[in-house]
Amino acid sequence: MRRTLSYVFMAMAILCFAMPVFAQGQTANAGPNWVAITSGFAMAIASGLCGLGQAKATAAAAEGLARNPAARPGIQLALILGLALIESLALYTLVIIFAKVK
Amino acid sequence: MPEELPFTALLNHIFGGAANALLDALHLAHNPRAPITDFVAMQILVVGFLLVVFLLVRARLSVDNPGGLQHIFEGLQGFVTGQSREIIGHHSEEFTPFLVALGVFILTCNLLGLVPAFESPTAVPSVPLGCAIVAFFYYHAQGIKRQGPLNYAKHFAGPMIWLAPLMIPIEIISHMARVLSLTIRLFANMFAGDMVTLVFFSLVPIGIPVIFLGLHVAVSLLQAYIFVLLTTVYLAGAVAEEH
């Protein structure tokens, strides 16, 4: 109980360190560039999910090729097509960033 | 004098007057001191180069003693014909000239950016858009030619006639999205390659950017292949007959 309370008070004390942030709001006429910050997160999320999708596609292609090496042309075609289509989804995010970030 | 490449400056010097007159007649906005923009000049260079190469191949065709150039182009033609036969089916040989021309044009445009004092025309949004629009009109025209306009329009209505009010808007939007995706895929790959090389150049000027130039070569090849492959897939969808 005492230990929990001491953790709670420590957390509240650390939160008070953030107070200077509010001091900036009234005096500065240009805040942080939210578009740039958000676009960084957006691109990271898009690239991460694209990486996951392409990993699944590549894993399935490798497994299919291991089971049936004679089907290589068809599997290779499906793999390249799938990878390019997934890649293009992440690239749409990049294009929006170039269009919107000054 | 606006910033431009040496080749563009040469073209503007020679053809500036004529280009200005043409653009004024068409009421298009342009910079009077450099009417021919960088990417237009690069495209002219690519087309001229490809004309010379294809005429060379044509002049040196021989059955008994094929040279290296003939081997390369026979391989390319065989590859595209084999792929379109696999995806479209029979009677697909007539599409090979268009697909090879499109693929070779996009590939040369992409690779041109690697040569110093030249830039990739495909790194500008207009050029991939032009290629995508050409591919769009080509596969619709082929579909109408193969199946007749009425039959082709019935395609868009979907499998059953009462689904038509739902299917037709979806089909129209998906066809528009094809143009958009072809354009943005090619443009973003080329543009991002340039950006990434520049970013790493600003960090480590010696050595590291060469890796990204190598990546640009691989991406150029892959993106040209993907563009041709997707055009083949759309052609297959347009000329397919259900039997």
Image (cartoon, rainbow, N blue to C red):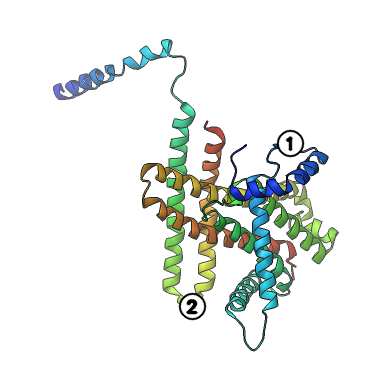
Badge count: 2
Along the line of sight, the residue nearer the viewer: B215 or B163: B215
Image height of A57 relative to B209, above or below: below
Residue B106 in which image quadrant? bottom right
Q: Which residue is mark 1?
A: B29
The extreme left residue here reads: A2
Tell me the kind of residue under disc 2. Answer: Ala
Q: Is B94 on the left-hand or right-hand side of A76?
A: right
Q: CA distance from mark 2 to mark 1?
A: 57 Å
- The answer to whether dots 2 and 1 both sit on one chain is no
* Residue B98 placement (x, y as % from top left): 71, 65
- Determine if residue B129 is in view: no
Along the line of sight, the residue nearer the viewer: A46 or B200: B200
Q: Which residue is mark 2?
A: A70
Q: Residues within 10 Å of mark 1 (few under 14, many from 20)?
A: few
Along the line of sight, the residue nearer the viewer: A25 or B26: B26
* Residue drawn where x is 71% and y is 37% of the image: B30
* Residue drawn where x is 73% and y is 74% of the image: B91
Q: Is B161 on the left-hand or right-hand side of B35?
A: right
Tell me the kind of residue under disc 1. Answer: Ala
Using the image, name the chain to which the residue with label 1 belongs.
B
Q: Secondary structure at mark 1?
A: loop
* Residue B213 placement (x, y as % from top left): 45, 55
